[in-house]
Amino acid sequence: MADFFFLIFGINNTLFINDTEDYMKTSAVTGNMLIAQSGGPSMVINQSLVGAITEAKKHKNIKNIYGSLHGIKGILSENMIDLRKESTATLEAVANTPSSGLGSVRKKPSAEDCTKIFAVLKKYNVRFFFYIGGNDSAETVHIISEEAKKSSFDLRCFHIPKTIDNDLRENDHTPGFGSAAKFVAMAVMGDDLDNRALPGVKIDVIMGRNAGFLTAASALARQYPDAGPHLIYLPEKPFNINKFVGAVKKTVDRLGRCVVAVSEGIADETGVPIISKFNNETDSHGNVQLSGTGALGDLLAGEIKKKSDISRVRADTFGYLQRSFPAILSKEDAKEARLVGKEAVKAAMKITSGSIAIRRKPGKKYQVYFEPVPLKNVAKETKHMPDEFINEDWNNVTQAFIDYVRPIVGELPKVGVFKAVKVKKA
Amino acid sequence: MADFFFLIFGINNTLFINDTEDYMKTSAVTGNMLIAQSGGPSMVINQSLVGAITEAKKHKNIKNIYGSLHGIKGILSENMIDLRKESTATLEAVANTPSSGLGSVRKKPSAEDCTKIFAVLKKYNVRFFFYIGGNDSAETVHIISEEAKKSSFDLRCFHIPKTIDNDLRENDHTPGFGSAAKFVAMAVMGDDLDNRALPGVKIDVIMGRNAGFLTAASALARQYPDAGPHLIYLPEKPFNINKFVGAVKKTVDRLGRCVVAVSEGIADETGVPIISKFNNETDSHGNVQLSGTGALGDLLAGEIKKKSDISRVRADTFGYLQRSFPAILSKEDAKEARLVGKEAVKAAMKITSGSIAIRRKPGKKYQVYFEPVPLKNVAKETKHMPDEFINEDWNNVTQAFIDYVRPIVGELPKVGVFKAVKVKKA
């Protein structure tokens, strides 16, 4: 009943009024369903997939359930699998496995591609199309949805949110972020203890092209006085190399060591990503390829060595582990990822298109609800860390951010440190 | 009783005969104990520390229990803490926390240092000295032990083994390795699934300066047909860049993708580490600094791009996470690490010096026992992957290695993949 309430009455009325063409109440259609996954994998993207499949099985007007392999690439090449042939045990095993079980793709469809995709969907009598991914995927769904409308073909088009970057508009946070944030917090927790044992400067480069949420989540690693990360640099604020070296030196003077969490997407005053000076590979969405390289960490470490007398400076780039390391899951994240998949199928019974947004209820206790929103509200532009989450010096997060992120990440391992009563010198 | 049996009667008799000066049965002495940690941290080095402390508390002839901060550095500067002042709750919390709770150091003591260390130990009436670390630490203990003998000062000197590299002689495997190997296996498991979703070539650079055990453990990631890692390169066998590119190409031709696990210590035909061409920083033991840089991964990725038409090539260097990531523990490893700490204290009641080796009992069921061995048998030289663990092409491990390593690592998360029944083209 609660779900029903939100889907029918809980939708933001403003959106209804402004976007009637994009967002229409409608009666159910009968036909096949196709689901696919897109973009960078996450630890819980398969939860959303399996949530949608299990919900779909409850609806008699959904006939075959197809899974396209490698996103829209599998639609274009008619490379699909029959998801009704998978046992419940397999579905549950896949749900608990990181990365995209159907395969993924980084492909922005051309106008020609979209026409072809739509033709394939029609050919297979697909009436329910679900695409799990980030803002680029929402855009793809939006284009296909428009194509269907132009042809007056009743195709329910839904975007199911997924991104470890946590940068989708309309969402309090996104499925995949909580688990990736937990990995990052744990990684920095361990790395800080490593640095405490063998002091020096340690730079950890964390994913997040334009949004600093994941890097910022490293702050959850702090569990004892003077615990790291001691400095946090985000893509939302200009990065100045001299200020950075100065802040590191100051921390080393105070603590004898310094752990720094840096977003891979940090940019200079003119908006040029620091890393782009070393790596110019771009994907088909025009995004600079930032991961899988130690260049940024090495660059920053080199600058510290050059501009200070600190000898032990190390850098690690967490890389793909952040989005695919198994078993390190935020329980809330896994649960919510499952539910957005389910909610998308439920919504498709009542409205023609949309994305399922996660909203947080006001109040002290962490509670969320799900709400369909127009595709175009989630597509294209992304969101960033608001100013209230970033400190004045642009090198740390605020308590407001900690309060925001803690329930999303959930429980973390406890760090034990000695009371360390000094032995009097003999 | 079983422990007693091994310590008194289970000791390798040959060692007794050949090394009487280094390895003497003796009656108990009374005095203070000092324990310290050295070298790169691990996930379970604090288990050994707490094992030794809790065992020490049972022996009335052990008076004060001192912990030196940052290994021998803390002895030289008389910077020690009183470990009897730590509550049981704190001890247990520290035991379950990665990295070295007492701090660590990478310092090879000079002759002068050793004289000073010995003077400090005498000044504080330390009669039991325990140093947790790798082969370099065993060497340090050996030198101090010799110093004590020269002065006829009854000082029990014990090395407690720790190294994620798994390269200590006399040991079937070393504390710290199992948990690090579990992290590596899980990391490659997730990364392989990531690569399966977004195909291409992925190179994962794994720790291990001279021994390939940790890199080889990535083989445990394989749980489904054609799972990665598809190629494994170890420092034990010469690395040839053209053969490497050829093997990658062959794998991509067959599977459309390739996941490669590479040890940071791979070296060319003349024994020169590939990475040393890019990074010449060395530690005080003369070891080239191999970690904390993406240079090797980037170099190998670059070679593939240059010598093939494969466009999507990525590299990650797992870095310090391998030795300090919290909560990813091999249960066996944690248990054994605790026990070697305990066994060292027990041995110190009966013999003057040694290192505690982990031996595996013959037979199908995995069972270990602990045995004191002379310090010099563990110091200096390290061990390597035997030939029977490496395939003929030098790019994979054998079943013998899998059988060896699986029980050390223990349980791993289960990977779920779809049966994937193809939809017939319409």
Image (spheres, coloured by chain):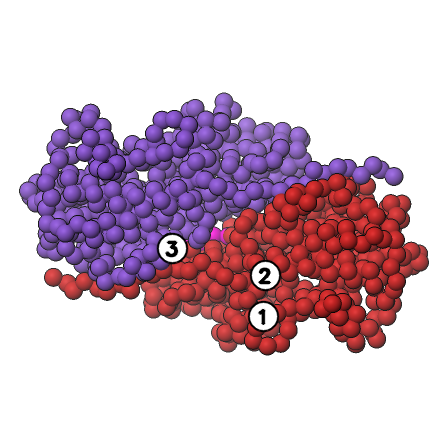
Chain colours: A red, B purple
Residue B271 versus residue A248 in the image, above or below: above
Q: Amino acid at mark 2?
A: Glu
Q: Are marks 2 and 1 in contact (CB under 8 Å)?
A: yes
At numbered mark 1, what does the secondary structure look like: helix, strand or loop? loop
Q: Amino acid at mark 1?
A: Tyr
At numbered mark 3, what does the secondary structure look like: helix, strand or loop? loop
Q: Which chain's residue wears label 2?
A: A
Front residue of B68 and A327? A327
Query: Which of pointers 2 and 3 indicates the residue nearer the eye?
Result: 2
Name the residue beneath numbered marker 1: A366
- Circle 2 packing at 10 Å, graded few (<14), some (14-19), many (20+), is some
Q: Amino acid at mark 3?
A: Thr
| Left or right of residue A306, residue A208 in this image | right
Region in magenta: A313-317
Determine the main secondary structure of the stretch shown in magenta. Answer: strand
- Circle 1 packing at 10 Å, graded few (<14), some (14-19), many (20+), is few
Query: Which of pointers 3 and 1 indicates the residue nearer the eye?
Result: 1
Q: Which chain's residue wears label 1?
A: A
At numbered mark 2, what does the secondary structure look like: helix, strand or loop? helix
Q: Position of residue B374 (x, y in %)?
A: 21, 34
Q: Residue at x 6, y 43 (%)?
A: B151
Name the residue beneath numbered marker 3: B97
Residue B375 picture quarter: top left
Q: Earlier in the sequence, mark 2 or mark 1?
A: 2
| Left or right of residue A20, residue A86 in this image | left
Q: Residue at x 16, y 26 (%)?
A: B18
Label 3, label 1: how far apart the Cα atoms are: 28 Å
- Circle 3 packing at 10 Å, graded few (<14), some (14-19), many (20+), is many
Residue ranking furthest to the left? B152
Name the residue beneath numbered marker 2: A332
